[in-house]
Image (cartoon, rainbow, N blue to C red):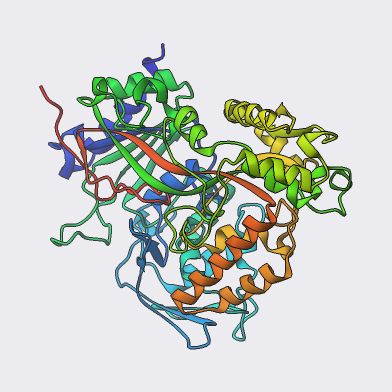
Amino acid sequence: MRRAYFLIPIVILVFLISCNPEKKNKDLRTVFNYNEMNGLTSLDPAAANNFENIWPVNQLFNGLVQMDDSLNVVPCIARTYSISEDGLKYTFILKPGVKFHDDVCFANGIGRNVTATDFVFSFERLYDSRVSSASSLMDNIGGDQNNKGFAAINDSVFEIRLKKPFSAFLSVLTMKFFSVIPREAIDHYKMDFRSHPVGTGPFVFKTWDEGTKLIMIKNNNYFERDKNNVRLPYLDAVTVSFIKDRETSFMELLNQKFDMLSGADAFNTNEVLDKDGNLRALYKKKFYLQKQTFLKTDYIGILIDEDVEIVRNSPLKLKAIRQAINYAFDRDKLVKYLRNNLGEAAHAGFIPKGLKSYNPDLVKGYHYNPDKVKELLAQAGFPDGKGLPEMTIHTTDNYKEQAEFIQSQLAENKIKVQISVEKPSILRQAVNNCDYNLFKKSWFSDYADEENFMSLFYSKNFAPKGVNFFHYKNPEFDKAFEEVLAEKNSAKKIELYQKMDRLIIEDAPVIPLYYDQVVRLVSHRIKGLGNNSMNLLNLKTVVKTPAER
Protein backbone atom coordinates (compact mmCIF):
# COMPACT_ATOMS: atom_id res chain seq x y z
CA MET A 1 0.00 0.00 0.00
CA ARG A 2 2.86 2.37 0.75
CA ARG A 3 3.95 2.48 -2.90
CA ALA A 4 0.43 2.81 -4.27
CA TYR A 5 -0.01 6.46 -3.30
CA PHE A 6 3.05 7.43 -5.35
CA LEU A 7 1.40 6.23 -8.57
CA ILE A 8 -1.58 8.57 -8.71
CA PRO A 9 0.40 11.84 -8.48
CA ILE A 10 2.91 10.58 -11.03
CA VAL A 11 0.09 9.73 -13.47
CA ILE A 12 -1.24 13.27 -12.91
CA LEU A 13 2.23 14.67 -13.57
CA VAL A 14 2.55 12.71 -16.82
CA PHE A 15 -0.80 14.11 -17.91
CA LEU A 16 0.07 17.68 -16.95
CA ILE A 17 3.33 17.69 -18.85
CA SER A 18 1.99 15.75 -21.86
CA CYS A 19 -0.82 18.31 -22.23
CA ASN A 20 1.81 20.83 -23.23
CA PRO A 21 2.64 20.24 -26.95
CA GLU A 22 6.20 21.42 -26.37
CA LYS A 23 6.64 18.69 -23.74
CA LYS A 24 5.22 15.62 -25.48
CA ASN A 25 8.62 14.19 -26.27
CA LYS A 26 10.33 15.37 -23.09
CA ASP A 27 11.65 12.73 -20.70
CA LEU A 28 10.17 12.70 -17.19
CA ARG A 29 13.69 12.23 -15.83
CA THR A 30 13.83 16.01 -15.48
CA VAL A 31 11.58 15.82 -12.42
CA PHE A 32 13.30 16.67 -9.11
CA ASN A 33 11.82 14.73 -6.17
CA TYR A 34 12.43 15.42 -2.50
CA ASN A 35 10.81 14.50 0.80
CA GLU A 36 9.61 16.80 3.56
CA MET A 37 9.21 14.83 6.80
CA ASN A 38 7.56 17.62 8.75
CA GLY A 39 4.81 18.34 6.25
CA LEU A 40 3.66 21.61 4.73
CA THR A 41 1.09 24.01 6.14
CA SER A 42 0.84 26.76 3.52
CA LEU A 43 2.11 27.88 0.11
CA ASP A 44 1.31 31.52 0.89
CA PRO A 45 4.56 33.51 1.21
CA ALA A 46 2.99 35.49 4.05
CA ALA A 47 3.13 32.25 6.07
CA ALA A 48 6.68 31.28 5.04
CA ASN A 49 7.98 31.11 8.60
CA ASN A 50 9.70 27.70 8.54
CA PHE A 51 11.83 25.70 6.11
CA GLU A 52 8.98 23.32 5.30
CA ASN A 53 7.00 26.22 3.83
CA ILE A 54 9.92 28.37 2.63
CA TRP A 55 11.38 25.77 0.28
CA PRO A 56 8.37 25.32 -2.05
CA VAL A 57 7.46 29.01 -1.74
CA ASN A 58 10.96 29.82 -3.02
CA GLN A 59 10.20 27.89 -6.20
CA LEU A 60 6.86 29.67 -6.74
CA PHE A 61 7.53 33.31 -5.80
CA ASN A 62 10.05 36.15 -6.17
CA GLY A 63 10.69 39.41 -4.35
CA LEU A 64 12.49 42.64 -5.10
CA VAL A 65 15.87 41.16 -4.15
CA GLN A 66 17.30 37.73 -3.42
CA MET A 67 20.26 36.11 -1.68
CA ASP A 68 22.89 34.28 -3.70
CA ASP A 69 24.79 31.28 -2.35
CA SER A 70 27.52 33.59 -1.02
CA LEU A 71 24.87 35.49 0.99
CA ASN A 72 25.15 38.60 -1.17
CA VAL A 73 21.94 40.56 -1.73
CA VAL A 74 21.38 40.78 -5.49
CA PRO A 75 18.52 42.10 -7.64
CA CYS A 76 15.58 39.85 -8.50
CA ILE A 77 12.38 41.49 -9.78
CA ALA A 78 14.09 44.80 -9.07
CA ARG A 79 16.53 45.60 -11.87
CA THR A 80 18.35 48.15 -9.70
CA TYR A 81 17.91 49.78 -6.32
CA SER A 82 19.28 52.79 -4.44
CA ILE A 83 19.40 53.91 -0.82
CA SER A 84 19.21 57.54 0.27
CA GLU A 85 22.13 59.12 2.12
CA ASP A 86 20.19 59.16 5.40
CA GLY A 87 19.37 55.44 5.04
CA LEU A 88 15.62 56.05 5.19
CA LYS A 89 14.48 55.79 1.56
CA TYR A 90 14.88 52.69 -0.63
CA THR A 91 13.98 53.03 -4.32
CA PHE A 92 13.56 49.96 -6.56
CA ILE A 93 13.34 50.04 -10.38
CA LEU A 94 11.48 46.93 -11.56
CA LYS A 95 12.50 44.75 -14.49
CA PRO A 96 10.10 45.02 -17.44
CA GLY A 97 8.14 41.99 -18.60
CA VAL A 98 8.08 39.95 -15.36
CA LYS A 99 4.82 37.99 -15.52
CA PHE A 100 2.61 36.27 -12.99
CA HIS A 101 1.87 32.61 -13.65
CA ASP A 102 -1.05 31.84 -15.92
CA ASP A 103 -4.10 31.20 -13.75
CA VAL A 104 -7.90 31.30 -13.90
CA CYS A 105 -7.86 34.34 -11.60
CA PHE A 106 -6.72 36.47 -14.58
CA ALA A 107 -8.67 37.49 -17.66
CA ASN A 108 -8.51 34.64 -20.20
CA GLY A 109 -6.32 32.73 -17.72
CA ILE A 110 -3.18 34.58 -18.88
CA GLY A 111 -0.77 35.99 -16.29
CA ARG A 112 -0.12 39.73 -16.57
CA ASN A 113 2.98 41.87 -16.00
CA VAL A 114 4.06 42.74 -12.47
CA THR A 115 3.85 46.42 -11.53
CA ALA A 116 4.94 48.44 -8.49
CA THR A 117 1.29 48.52 -7.37
CA ASP A 118 1.49 44.74 -6.87
CA PHE A 119 4.27 45.26 -4.34
CA VAL A 120 2.14 47.85 -2.53
CA PHE A 121 -0.67 45.28 -2.28
CA SER A 122 1.70 42.50 -1.21
CA PHE A 123 3.30 44.61 1.52
CA GLU A 124 -0.06 45.88 2.81
CA ARG A 125 -1.24 42.29 3.19
CA LEU A 126 1.59 41.56 5.64
CA TYR A 127 -0.28 43.61 8.26
CA ASP A 128 -3.13 41.07 8.20
CA SER A 129 -2.56 38.79 11.22
CA ARG A 130 -4.98 36.21 9.78
CA VAL A 131 -2.53 35.31 7.04
CA SER A 132 0.83 36.78 8.00
CA SER A 133 3.41 36.09 10.69
CA ALA A 134 5.57 38.98 9.49
CA SER A 135 3.77 41.98 10.96
CA SER A 136 6.63 42.78 13.37
CA LEU A 137 8.97 43.13 10.39
CA MET A 138 6.82 46.05 9.23
CA ASP A 139 7.22 48.07 12.44
CA ASN A 140 10.06 50.21 11.09
CA ILE A 141 8.38 50.94 7.76
CA GLY A 142 6.63 54.30 7.69
CA GLY A 143 7.25 57.67 6.17
CA ASP A 144 5.91 60.96 4.98
CA GLN A 145 4.18 59.94 1.76
CA ASN A 146 1.58 57.66 3.36
CA ASN A 147 0.90 55.97 6.64
CA LYS A 148 2.31 52.66 5.42
CA GLY A 149 5.66 53.98 4.23
CA PHE A 150 5.70 52.38 0.77
CA ALA A 151 4.30 53.54 -2.54
CA ALA A 152 4.20 52.91 -6.29
CA ILE A 153 5.73 56.03 -7.85
CA ASN A 154 4.70 54.63 -11.23
CA ASP A 155 4.34 51.13 -12.72
CA SER A 156 8.07 50.45 -12.58
CA VAL A 157 9.23 52.33 -9.45
CA PHE A 158 8.53 51.13 -5.92
CA GLU A 159 9.65 53.16 -2.90
CA ILE A 160 9.99 52.24 0.78
CA ARG A 161 10.58 54.71 3.63
CA LEU A 162 11.85 53.66 7.06
CA LYS A 163 11.23 55.38 10.39
CA LYS A 164 14.83 54.76 11.46
CA PRO A 165 17.92 53.65 9.54
CA PHE A 166 18.30 49.86 9.54
CA SER A 167 21.50 48.58 7.96
CA ALA A 168 20.15 45.02 7.59
CA PHE A 169 16.97 46.07 5.76
CA LEU A 170 18.00 44.81 2.31
CA SER A 171 18.75 41.40 3.83
CA VAL A 172 15.32 41.43 5.46
CA LEU A 173 13.71 41.97 2.04
CA THR A 174 15.18 38.66 0.80
CA MET A 175 12.78 36.82 3.13
CA LYS A 176 9.94 35.10 1.27
CA PHE A 177 7.35 37.15 3.21
CA PHE A 178 8.14 40.02 0.85
CA SER A 179 7.32 38.12 -2.35
CA VAL A 180 5.01 39.76 -4.87
CA ILE A 181 1.49 38.38 -5.30
CA PRO A 182 -1.41 39.51 -7.52
CA ARG A 183 -4.58 41.02 -6.04
CA GLU A 184 -6.65 38.96 -8.51
CA ALA A 185 -5.49 35.72 -6.87
CA ILE A 186 -6.52 36.87 -3.39
CA ASP A 187 -9.86 38.15 -4.68
CA HIS A 188 -10.46 34.82 -6.44
CA TYR A 189 -9.14 32.30 -3.88
CA LYS A 190 -9.46 34.39 -0.70
CA MET A 191 -8.20 32.37 2.31
CA ASP A 192 -7.67 29.35 0.03
CA PHE A 193 -4.71 31.15 -1.56
CA ARG A 194 -2.58 29.02 0.81
CA SER A 195 -3.35 26.02 -1.40
CA HIS A 196 -3.75 27.84 -4.74
CA PRO A 197 -0.63 30.02 -4.96
CA VAL A 198 0.00 32.33 -7.91
CA GLY A 199 3.44 33.88 -8.17
CA THR A 200 6.22 34.71 -10.61
CA GLY A 201 8.73 31.98 -9.70
CA PRO A 202 10.60 29.43 -11.85
CA PHE A 203 7.93 26.80 -11.17
CA VAL A 204 4.14 26.94 -11.38
CA PHE A 205 1.80 25.32 -8.86
CA LYS A 206 -0.23 22.41 -10.23
CA THR A 207 -1.58 20.27 -7.41
CA TRP A 208 -1.19 19.67 -3.68
CA ASP A 209 -2.69 16.57 -2.12
CA GLU A 210 -2.05 17.57 1.48
CA GLY A 211 0.00 15.03 3.37
CA THR A 212 0.81 13.10 0.20
CA LYS A 213 2.29 15.05 -2.72
CA LEU A 214 2.94 18.56 -4.04
CA ILE A 215 3.60 19.05 -7.76
CA MET A 216 5.07 22.15 -9.41
CA ILE A 217 5.95 22.35 -13.13
CA LYS A 218 8.28 24.51 -15.15
CA ASN A 219 7.35 28.15 -15.75
CA ASN A 220 7.99 28.59 -19.47
CA ASN A 221 7.71 32.36 -19.08
CA TYR A 222 10.22 32.74 -16.25
CA PHE A 223 12.20 35.98 -16.48
CA GLU A 224 15.66 34.87 -15.26
CA ARG A 225 18.28 33.44 -17.63
CA ASP A 226 21.66 31.81 -17.12
CA LYS A 227 25.00 33.28 -18.20
CA ASN A 228 24.48 31.80 -21.69
CA ASN A 229 21.10 33.55 -21.98
CA VAL A 230 19.21 30.26 -21.60
CA ARG A 231 15.89 30.69 -19.83
CA LEU A 232 15.66 29.10 -16.39
CA PRO A 233 14.69 26.66 -14.95
CA TYR A 234 16.19 23.55 -16.56
CA LEU A 235 13.93 21.04 -14.76
CA ASP A 236 10.50 20.12 -16.08
CA ALA A 237 8.94 19.71 -12.65
CA VAL A 238 9.43 19.39 -8.90
CA THR A 239 7.56 17.01 -6.61
CA VAL A 240 7.53 17.03 -2.83
CA SER A 241 6.50 13.99 -0.78
CA PHE A 242 5.59 13.94 2.90
CA ILE A 243 6.78 10.63 4.30
CA LYS A 244 7.26 10.99 8.05
CA ASP A 245 9.23 7.78 8.61
CA ARG A 246 12.92 8.39 7.98
CA GLU A 247 13.72 4.72 7.23
CA THR A 248 11.04 4.63 4.52
CA SER A 249 12.20 7.92 2.99
CA PHE A 250 15.81 6.73 3.04
CA MET A 251 14.82 3.57 1.13
CA GLU A 252 13.11 5.78 -1.45
CA LEU A 253 16.38 7.68 -1.87
CA LEU A 254 18.29 4.41 -2.31
CA ASN A 255 15.72 3.28 -4.90
CA GLN A 256 16.08 6.61 -6.78
CA LYS A 257 12.51 7.66 -6.03
CA PHE A 258 13.92 10.72 -4.28
CA ASP A 259 16.77 12.91 -5.49
CA MET A 260 17.58 14.46 -2.10
CA LEU A 261 17.11 14.11 1.63
CA SER A 262 17.96 17.10 3.78
CA GLY A 263 18.83 17.43 7.46
CA ALA A 264 20.52 15.16 9.98
CA ASP A 265 17.05 14.12 11.25
CA ALA A 266 16.09 12.84 7.80
CA PHE A 267 18.31 9.75 7.96
CA ASN A 268 20.23 7.58 10.42
CA THR A 269 23.52 9.46 10.68
CA ASN A 270 25.23 6.56 12.47
CA GLU A 271 24.36 4.29 9.57
CA VAL A 272 25.20 6.67 6.72
CA LEU A 273 28.10 8.71 8.11
CA ASP A 274 31.31 7.74 9.88
CA LYS A 275 32.43 9.37 13.12
CA ASP A 276 34.16 12.13 11.17
CA GLY A 277 30.88 13.07 9.49
CA ASN A 278 31.88 11.68 6.08
CA LEU A 279 29.79 9.45 3.84
CA ARG A 280 30.45 5.74 4.33
CA ALA A 281 31.89 3.94 1.30
CA LEU A 282 28.77 1.75 1.02
CA TYR A 283 26.69 4.73 -0.11
CA LYS A 284 29.12 6.73 -2.23
CA LYS A 285 27.94 5.10 -5.46
CA LYS A 286 24.32 6.04 -4.75
CA PHE A 287 24.59 9.69 -3.72
CA TYR A 288 26.92 12.42 -2.56
CA LEU A 289 27.01 14.41 0.66
CA GLN A 290 26.57 18.17 0.75
CA LYS A 291 27.77 19.87 3.94
CA GLN A 292 27.72 23.59 4.47
CA THR A 293 28.03 25.96 7.39
CA PHE A 294 24.53 26.75 8.68
CA LEU A 295 23.65 30.11 10.24
CA LYS A 296 22.22 28.35 13.28
CA THR A 297 23.31 28.23 16.91
CA ASP A 298 22.06 25.51 19.26
CA TYR A 299 22.06 26.59 22.89
CA ILE A 300 20.72 26.21 26.38
CA GLY A 301 19.03 29.43 27.43
CA ILE A 302 18.97 30.83 30.96
CA LEU A 303 16.23 33.12 32.27
CA ILE A 304 18.07 35.71 34.40
CA ASP A 305 15.39 38.32 35.14
CA GLU A 306 15.19 38.62 38.94
CA ASP A 307 11.76 40.22 38.61
CA VAL A 308 10.56 36.69 37.75
CA GLU A 309 9.99 34.56 40.84
CA ILE A 310 11.66 31.39 39.58
CA VAL A 311 14.85 33.39 39.04
CA ARG A 312 14.82 35.01 42.48
CA ASN A 313 14.85 31.54 44.02
CA SER A 314 17.45 30.06 41.65
CA PRO A 315 21.26 29.99 41.74
CA LEU A 316 21.10 30.85 38.03
CA LYS A 317 20.68 34.49 39.00
CA LEU A 318 24.41 34.39 39.84
CA LYS A 319 26.73 35.07 36.92
CA ALA A 320 29.41 32.81 38.43
CA ILE A 321 27.03 29.82 38.36
CA ARG A 322 26.06 30.50 34.74
CA GLN A 323 29.74 30.73 33.80
CA ALA A 324 30.51 27.55 35.75
CA ILE A 325 27.93 25.59 33.78
CA ASN A 326 29.46 26.91 30.55
CA TYR A 327 32.87 25.54 31.60
CA ALA A 328 31.54 22.24 32.99
CA PHE A 329 31.06 20.12 29.85
CA ASP A 330 33.03 19.27 26.72
CA ARG A 331 31.39 20.69 23.60
CA ASP A 332 33.92 18.98 21.33
CA LYS A 333 32.95 15.54 22.63
CA LEU A 334 29.26 16.39 22.29
CA VAL A 335 29.71 17.26 18.60
CA LYS A 336 32.03 14.34 17.88
CA TYR A 337 30.16 11.51 19.58
CA LEU A 338 26.54 12.65 19.53
CA ARG A 339 26.46 14.43 16.17
CA ASN A 340 29.05 12.54 14.10
CA ASN A 341 31.03 15.77 13.80
CA LEU A 342 28.13 17.54 12.09
CA GLY A 343 28.61 21.14 13.10
CA GLU A 344 31.27 22.85 15.17
CA ALA A 345 31.59 23.24 18.93
CA ALA A 346 30.56 26.76 19.99
CA HIS A 347 33.85 28.03 21.39
CA ALA A 348 33.26 31.62 20.24
CA GLY A 349 30.14 33.69 20.87
CA PHE A 350 26.48 33.31 20.03
CA ILE A 351 27.01 34.56 16.46
CA PRO A 352 27.65 31.42 14.36
CA LYS A 353 30.38 30.58 11.92
CA GLY A 354 29.51 31.89 8.46
CA LEU A 355 28.79 35.49 9.40
CA LYS A 356 31.43 38.18 8.96
CA SER A 357 31.87 39.02 12.63
CA TYR A 358 32.52 35.42 13.66
CA ASN A 359 36.09 35.34 14.95
CA PRO A 360 37.11 32.93 17.76
CA ASP A 361 40.36 34.87 18.21
CA LEU A 362 38.49 38.08 19.05
CA VAL A 363 35.39 36.58 20.67
CA LYS A 364 36.60 33.88 23.04
CA GLY A 365 33.87 31.62 24.36
CA TYR A 366 33.97 28.69 26.76
CA HIS A 367 36.05 25.48 26.74
CA TYR A 368 35.84 22.53 29.12
CA ASN A 369 37.73 23.55 32.26
CA PRO A 370 37.03 21.69 35.54
CA ASP A 371 39.46 23.91 37.48
CA LYS A 372 37.55 27.00 36.41
CA VAL A 373 34.27 25.35 37.42
CA LYS A 374 35.64 24.67 40.90
CA GLU A 375 36.86 28.26 41.22
CA LEU A 376 33.52 29.74 40.13
CA LEU A 377 31.46 27.48 42.41
CA ALA A 378 33.52 28.62 45.39
CA GLN A 379 33.19 32.24 44.27
CA ALA A 380 29.41 31.83 44.16
CA GLY A 381 29.34 30.44 47.70
CA PHE A 382 29.00 26.75 46.83
CA PRO A 383 32.49 25.22 47.36
CA ASP A 384 32.67 21.81 45.61
CA GLY A 385 28.98 22.23 44.87
CA LYS A 386 27.95 21.99 48.52
CA GLY A 387 24.53 23.51 49.03
CA LEU A 388 23.99 24.16 45.32
CA PRO A 389 20.32 23.45 44.54
CA GLU A 390 19.47 20.99 41.78
CA MET A 391 18.32 22.61 38.53
CA THR A 392 16.22 21.33 35.61
CA ILE A 393 17.02 21.47 31.88
CA HIS A 394 13.83 21.47 29.81
CA THR A 395 14.24 19.94 26.35
CA THR A 396 12.51 17.87 23.65
CA ASP A 397 13.00 14.22 22.81
CA ASN A 398 15.28 15.02 19.85
CA TYR A 399 17.86 16.50 22.21
CA LYS A 400 17.44 14.16 25.18
CA GLU A 401 20.73 12.35 24.50
CA GLN A 402 22.64 15.65 24.34
CA ALA A 403 21.01 16.80 27.58
CA GLU A 404 21.99 13.53 29.27
CA PHE A 405 25.60 13.98 28.17
CA ILE A 406 25.65 17.50 29.63
CA GLN A 407 23.92 16.25 32.80
CA SER A 408 26.61 13.59 33.28
CA GLN A 409 29.50 15.99 32.82
CA LEU A 410 27.95 18.61 35.08
CA ALA A 411 27.52 15.94 37.77
CA GLU A 412 31.25 15.14 37.55
CA ASN A 413 31.82 18.83 38.32
CA LYS A 414 29.45 18.90 41.30
CA ILE A 415 26.55 20.57 39.47
CA LYS A 416 23.33 18.56 39.60
CA VAL A 417 20.62 18.94 36.99
CA GLN A 418 17.49 17.03 36.15
CA ILE A 419 16.11 16.64 32.62
CA SER A 420 12.49 17.27 31.70
CA VAL A 421 11.52 16.05 28.21
CA GLU A 422 8.51 17.82 26.73
CA LYS A 423 6.61 18.28 23.52
CA PRO A 424 8.03 21.07 21.30
CA SER A 425 4.81 23.11 21.48
CA ILE A 426 4.72 22.94 25.28
CA LEU A 427 8.39 23.88 25.60
CA ARG A 428 8.00 26.77 23.17
CA GLN A 429 5.01 28.21 25.03
CA ALA A 430 6.61 27.79 28.46
CA VAL A 431 9.81 29.53 27.37
CA ASN A 432 7.80 32.40 25.88
CA ASN A 433 5.89 32.74 29.15
CA CYS A 434 9.07 32.71 31.28
CA ASP A 435 7.99 29.50 33.05
CA TYR A 436 11.40 27.80 32.72
CA ASN A 437 14.82 29.14 33.61
CA LEU A 438 16.98 26.52 31.85
CA PHE A 439 15.86 25.38 28.39
CA LYS A 440 17.26 23.88 25.18
CA LYS A 441 16.58 25.87 22.01
CA SER A 442 18.19 26.85 18.72
CA TRP A 443 18.15 29.95 16.57
CA PHE A 444 18.65 30.03 12.82
CA SER A 445 18.98 33.15 10.78
CA ASP A 446 15.93 34.64 9.09
CA TYR A 447 18.30 36.77 7.01
CA ALA A 448 22.07 36.94 6.64
CA ASP A 449 22.94 39.61 9.16
CA GLU A 450 24.27 39.36 12.73
CA GLU A 451 21.50 41.69 13.89
CA ASN A 452 19.14 38.73 13.64
CA PHE A 453 21.13 36.90 16.35
CA MET A 454 21.89 39.88 18.55
CA SER A 455 18.22 40.91 18.61
CA LEU A 456 17.65 38.01 21.03
CA PHE A 457 19.55 39.95 23.71
CA TYR A 458 18.18 43.47 23.16
CA SER A 459 16.28 44.58 26.26
CA LYS A 460 13.33 45.97 24.29
CA ASN A 461 12.67 42.48 22.87
CA PHE A 462 11.66 40.75 26.13
CA ALA A 463 9.49 37.65 25.69
CA PRO A 464 6.62 36.99 25.37
CA LYS A 465 6.23 39.86 22.89
CA GLY A 466 9.81 39.58 21.64
CA VAL A 467 12.56 36.98 21.26
CA ASN A 468 14.68 37.86 24.30
CA PHE A 469 13.78 34.64 26.12
CA PHE A 470 16.54 35.28 28.68
CA HIS A 471 15.27 38.73 29.71
CA TYR A 472 18.86 39.87 29.37
CA LYS A 473 19.37 43.59 29.96
CA ASN A 474 22.70 45.38 29.65
CA PRO A 475 22.78 49.13 28.81
CA GLU A 476 26.21 48.78 27.16
CA PHE A 477 24.87 46.02 24.92
CA ASP A 478 21.74 48.02 24.06
CA LYS A 479 23.81 51.07 23.14
CA ALA A 480 25.99 49.04 20.75
CA PHE A 481 22.91 47.33 19.27
CA GLU A 482 21.24 50.65 18.53
CA GLU A 483 24.46 52.04 17.04
CA VAL A 484 24.87 49.11 14.66
CA LEU A 485 21.38 49.53 13.20
CA ALA A 486 22.36 52.88 11.69
CA GLU A 487 25.99 52.04 10.93
CA LYS A 488 26.89 51.94 7.21
CA ASN A 489 30.58 51.06 7.55
CA SER A 490 31.01 47.28 7.34
CA ALA A 491 34.18 47.17 9.45
CA LYS A 492 32.58 49.24 12.21
CA LYS A 493 29.53 46.97 12.19
CA ILE A 494 31.76 43.94 12.69
CA GLU A 495 33.48 45.61 15.65
CA LEU A 496 30.14 46.43 17.27
CA TYR A 497 28.79 42.90 16.80
CA GLN A 498 31.96 41.41 18.30
CA LYS A 499 31.67 43.78 21.26
CA MET A 500 28.07 42.64 21.84
CA ASP A 501 29.06 38.99 21.54
CA ARG A 502 31.83 39.42 24.14
CA LEU A 503 29.34 41.00 26.55
CA ILE A 504 27.05 37.99 26.14
CA ILE A 505 29.92 35.61 26.85
CA GLU A 506 30.85 37.55 29.98
CA ASP A 507 27.30 37.84 31.36
CA ALA A 508 26.41 34.26 30.31
CA PRO A 509 22.63 34.42 29.88
CA VAL A 510 23.08 31.59 27.39
CA ILE A 511 25.11 28.39 26.99
CA PRO A 512 26.13 28.10 23.31
CA LEU A 513 26.48 24.43 22.36
CA TYR A 514 27.40 24.21 18.67
CA TYR A 515 27.09 25.93 15.31
CA ASP A 516 25.09 23.64 13.03
CA GLN A 517 25.64 22.48 9.45
CA VAL A 518 23.38 22.08 6.44
CA VAL A 519 23.51 18.36 5.52
CA ARG A 520 22.03 16.88 2.35
CA LEU A 521 22.20 13.47 0.68
CA VAL A 522 21.92 14.06 -3.07
CA SER A 523 21.62 11.66 -6.00
CA HIS A 524 24.58 11.59 -8.40
CA ARG A 525 22.08 12.37 -11.16
CA ILE A 526 21.63 15.88 -9.74
CA LYS A 527 23.99 18.66 -10.85
CA GLY A 528 23.90 22.38 -10.13
CA LEU A 529 22.22 22.13 -6.73
CA GLY A 530 23.53 25.13 -4.84
CA ASN A 531 24.18 25.06 -1.12
CA ASN A 532 24.24 28.04 1.20
CA SER A 533 24.46 28.75 4.91
CA MET A 534 20.86 30.01 4.97
CA ASN A 535 19.76 26.49 3.93
CA LEU A 536 17.58 27.98 1.21
CA LEU A 537 16.64 25.46 -1.51
CA ASN A 538 17.11 26.88 -5.00
CA LEU A 539 16.13 24.53 -7.83
CA LYS A 540 16.10 26.88 -10.82
CA THR A 541 19.67 25.94 -11.87
CA VAL A 542 19.41 22.20 -11.19
CA VAL A 543 20.04 19.69 -13.97
CA LYS A 544 19.02 16.04 -13.71
CA THR A 545 20.89 13.54 -15.88
CA PRO A 546 19.30 10.37 -17.30
CA ALA A 547 19.27 7.22 -15.21
CA GLU A 548 21.73 4.47 -16.07
CA ARG A 549 20.14 1.61 -17.98
Specify whether residue 218 is in view.
Answer: yes
Residue at image point 36% right, 31% down:
276
Counting every numbered tag in the picture gives 0
Q: Quadrant of residue 481?
A: bottom right
| 122 sits left or right of 216 in the view | right
Q: Residue furthest top?
A: 1
Residue at image point 30% right, 46% down:
539
Return the residue nearer the eye: 253 or 28: 253
Instruction: Classify 324 as above or below 546.
Output: below
Q: Residue 450: give x, y in percent of width and height.
A: 52, 62
Q: Residue furthest left?
A: 549
Instruction: Classify 169 as above or below 295.
Output: below
Residue at image point 50% right, 64% down:
172
Residue at image point 72% right, 52% down:
470
Q: Residue 30: give x, y in percent of width and height.
A: 21, 37
Q: Residue 6: give x, y in percent of width and height.
A: 36, 22
Instruction: Classify 207 as above or below 128.
Output: above
Specify whether residue 127 is in view.
Answer: no
Q: Residue 54: give x, y in percent of width and height.
A: 47, 47
Quarter of the picture containing the C terminus is top left
Return the residue nearer the eye: 422 or 211: 422
Quarter of the picture containing the N terminus is top left
